[in-house]
Amino acid sequence: MIEPWWPLAVLALIHFGDALLCIKPVGFVRRCLVDVGFPERYWRLLPLLKFAAAAGLVIGIWFRPLAILTSAALVCYFLIAFTSHIRARDFGRNLFLNCTGMLAACTAALAFAIAA
């Protein structure tokens, strides 16, 4: 078991909440997806990915390789999101607060899982 376990649990809770917001995207999520040009036909996959990330982080508390894999996948996800915001010239709150903050949190979780 990874000790302390709470950093992974907090990140899992954030992704679980984000998944709920993506089921029927709330206004700010919808605007973000539209602003970066993410195709609407793929929107329904986002909750599945985010629920899977939350589950991977929770299970990773007891199975460290899964914590590392899930955290690494989340870093890749947010690197792609970051470049999508840059490409779309979306330099507002979505990039600097939401995307960059989550990229930093996921990178920290990856470093934490590797060091644990």
Image (cartoon, rainbow, N blue to C red):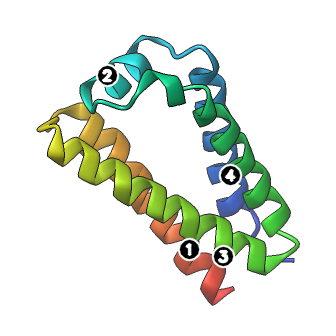
Distance between the Cα atoms at labels 4 and 1? 13 Å
Q: Is residue 69 above or below residue 50?
A: below
Q: Secondary structure at mark 2?
A: helix
Q: Is residue 99 above or below residue 44?
A: below
**Residue located farthest toward the bottom when viewing the structure as drawn:** 115
Mark 3 Cα-neighbour bin, 10 Å: few <14, some 14–19, many ≥20: many
Marks 2 and 4, the one that precedes in the sequence? 2
**What residue is pinned by disc 1?**
110
At x 36% / y 55%, what residue is drawn? 80
**What residue is pinned by disc 4?**
53
Q: Is residue 101 above or below residue 31?
A: below
Disc 1 and disc 3 in contact, CB within 8 angstroms? yes
Query: Horizontal placement of 93 versus 14: left or right?
Result: left
**Residue type at numbered disc 4:** Ala
Quarter of the N terminus within the rendering: bottom right
**Residue type at numbered disc 3:** Ile
Quarter of the C terminus within the rendering: bottom right
At x 52% / y 30%, what residue is drawn? 42
User: Residue 61 location, x and y as percent?
Assistant: 81, 68
Marks 3 and 2, the one that precedes in the sequence? 2
**What residue is pinned by disc 2?**
34
Q: Which label sits in the foreground, 3 or 2?
A: 2
**What residue is pinned by disc 3?**
68
Marks 1 and 3, the one that precedes in the sequence? 3
Marks 2 and 1, the one that precedes in the sequence? 2
Q: Which label sits in the foreground, 2 or 1?
A: 2
Picture quadrant where residue 66 is located: bottom right
User: Residue 14 location, x and y as percent?
Assistant: 61, 41
Query: Horizontal placement of 7 versus 2: left or right?
Result: left
At x 14% / y 38%, what residue is drawn? 91
Distance between the Cα atoms at labels 3 and 2? 31 Å
At x 35% / y 45%, what residue is drawn? 99
